[in-house]
Amino acid sequence: MSEPTSGTRPTLEAVAERAGVSRATVSRVVNGGAGVRQVLVDKVRKAVEELGYIPNHAARTLVTRRNGAVAVIIAEPEFRIFSDPFFEQQVRGISRELTAHDAQLVLLWVEGPGDHERIARYLGGGHVDGALAFSLHNDDELPEIVRRVQVPTVFGGRPGWEEADGALTVPYVDCDNRGGARAAVRHLRGLGRRSIAHIAGPGDQTSALDRLEGYRDELPGGDPGLVAEGAFTEESGARAMGELLHRRPDLDAVFAANDLMASGALRVLRERGLRVPEDVALVGFDDVLSVAEATDPPLTTVRQDIEGMGRLMVRILMRLLDGEGAEPVITPTELVRRASA
Amino acid sequence: MSEPTSGTRPTLEAVAERAGVSRATVSRVVNGGAGVRQVLVDKVRKAVEELGYIPNHAARTLVTRRNGAVAVIIAEPEFRIFSDPFFEQQVRGISRELTAHDAQLVLLWVEGPGDHERIARYLGGGHVDGALAFSLHNDDELPEIVRRVQVPTVFGGRPGWEEADGALTVPYVDCDNRGGARAAVRHLRGLGRRSIAHIAGPGDQTSALDRLEGYRDELPGGDPGLVAEGAFTEESGARAMGELLHRRPDLDAVFAANDLMASGALRVLRERGLRVPEDVALVGFDDVLSVAEATDPPLTTVRQDIEGMGRLMVRILMRLLDGEGAEPVITPTELVRRASA
DNA sequence: TTTCCGGCTGAGAGCGCTCTCCCCGGCGGT
DNA sequence: ACCGCCGGGGAGAGCGCTCTCAGCCGGAAA
């Protein structure tokens, strides 16, 4: 392939001239070549090759109003993103599916309070066709932003304001948190455990709330002293476990709202010389393999298909972009028995 | 703020009309408002506000040839990115600095073999003004790609081909790997250790090679049996440690090429009942806090200012984008003494 | 008063591409 | 032989913005 003529990049025009056809024809060929005689197609292809032509994205976007990129917005600072394997799996699913749809992934995260303005400008500026938003907290500004700038968006996890505003249903993908939690507690009860504690997630996230609901469903009139709140991190799980042990030294089972907190709890239990599952049975949530299978003993946990949910979000977004409607989707969960309970 | 008139987004034109000025004036105000009478500035600002005007990015890019975005390309599949705290810190530095420069970060990673074509199209399409590339392996296609599509790029870590092609110096930021490694080994020797092993990183990355060089500098004529190769992951560090212990059961010190491998090694040492540092002294590299401070005992390690290097890369790239030249930068390393050696 | 200058503002020409026409030529039907 | 149709290809009008350039106006200098 010969080098481009000079520092300036070749345009459609240049290709057209070299191939001896019009701009329109080159455009047709570049975009698939339908309805163009093979002779010309070949000529154009050759010219493209020789000049090293790459379509200018901005020009194309300007007229098509599509730019083939989708933003993944994570409402957490980057340290959380990179340390939580949950995001990793979700992003992996999204990434794969997006690539399959020939779309580009742009990963954004909020840098800190007040950073939403930047996100709004980015989204509003038309850099992306749509967005996938995660890890929303109850008072998150993101939903308002995407509404204002009119960017089609699919949420990961049930948004907290849904019930408050029954009229407006936003598309989201979530797993059956409540059902999963119920299954976990039921399993623990089936094991003959009497004093089942719960390490809940942060109270401003629906996934945490729903899991707590599920826990309560199975233990009506339960002891509030058996519930401690964590922040979905390993560290906070350890702290919550310490609290619970302090308040209810006789507990014989723990259901943690995610695997990371379960692993923190496990660490504390062992430090205190308690055997898992003999003395205390432990169940997690998520089935993040790098955590649930890595602990000793491996975690019994509630599996959700995280990667699949990511892919699903993309598919729903694509449908949205095609002007079709979209409904929230709740995916099933499944109890995975390992050694911890 | 009143809602936009209809579904279609307001343009410069609309703002101009509403404010009773020309497009040019609106453009001036939107871009800073220099050289426009205050009266008009206010009028325009008001109109912008009322219409909820947001500049169209594609149109702007088309004429300015700048789009305010920088790609961060990581030549690793996403699971590595998300599990390695090194990337986290580096990305954090980059992210902060980019935000300070009012530029947008676009995170890209290679999905697998053959995926480079996608990256090339993205870069070539003018989605970004420049790129930062990481974790290159020796035979990586990335350098060739950025050269071909003429995207200003700063590399993280010394590229492997540099010496082969002395004429062309690409800008990069790296720490003094060799010097750091030397300091680590010197420290170990100073502790009176005789049999100092090395868990090296993958042989196709210069950082690993340079650290190995440093190790050898201090132990001329060293025993090759004391070197095992890992892959910069916790797991591979554990495996390498096992190997070393098998080959040289009498070793009394280990220098691991990064903290993650050191923590894997530590795990194995403890499993074998060896005390650290009493029986085996251990030194890591990187000083990734979430690893080096979290182990028991905490790791003595060679610190490099990872976040600072990220920021530095951005600054160099910005200089490049302003048409100024840029030289490779080597940042200093420093031995941090903790309990493991 | 005239001239000049400097600060503001508006007109208009693109940036590179897509897409809607419209034209042209060949073919089948009458 | 004429008409209509259809497929292929070109001309040209923008997409929304920036930026140069020219014009205008008021005040300072002559």
Image (cartoon, coloured by chain):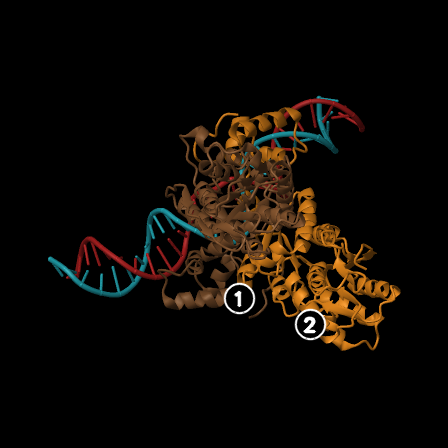
Chain colours: A brown, B orange, C cyan, D red
* Residue B100 horizontal side relative to residue A30, left or right: right
Tell which circle, 2 or 1, labels the residue nearer the N-terminal end: 1
Q: Which of the pair B320/A168 is nearer the observer?
A: A168
Instruction: From the top left corner, tell me how far across and down residue A117 is, in percent.
Output: 60, 36
Across the whole image, how many numbered discs are drawn on residues? Answer: 2
Instruction: Tell me the subunit letter for badge 2.
Output: B
Q: Residue B289 carries which label?
A: none
Q: Is residue B281 above or below residue A187?
A: below
Q: Which amino acid lies under the numbered mark 2 shown in the image of this protein?
A: Glu
The secondary element bearing badge 2 is classed as helix
Instruction: From the top left corner, tell me how far across and down residue A300 is, in percent.
Output: 51, 52
**Do tags 2 and 1 sit on the same chain?**
yes
Q: Which of the pair B27/D29 is nearer the observer?
A: B27
Instruction: From the top left corner, tell me how far across and down residue B309 is, in percent.
Output: 74, 53
Residue A225 lies in quadrant: top right
Residue A103 appears in the rendering: no
Near mark 2 (Cα within 10 A), the count class, few <14, some 14-19 or many ≥20, is some
Instruction: From the top left corner, tell me how far across and down residue A308 is, in percent.
Output: 45, 52
* Residue B102 horizontal side relative to residue A38, left or right: right
Residue pointed to by mark 2: B243
Q: What's the distance in space between the residues labelled 2 and 1, CA to CA?
A: 33 Å
Q: Which amino acid lies under the numbered mark 1 shown in the image of this protein?
A: Gly
Q: Which of the pair B51/D15 is nearer the observer?
A: B51
Q: In this view, does B50 lie above or below B303?
A: above
Q: Residue B114 carries which label?
A: 1
Q: Which of the pair A89/B19 is nearer the observer?
A: A89
Image quarter where the N terminus of chain A lies is: bottom right
* Residue A13 horizontal side relative to residue B148, left or right: left
Q: Which one is in front in this view, the residue at disc 2 or the one at disc 1?
A: 2
Instruction: Tell me the subunit letter for badge 1.
Output: B
* Residue A286 horizontal side relative to residue B301, left or right: left
Near mark 1 (Cα within 10 A), the count class, few <14, some 14-19 or many ≥20, is few
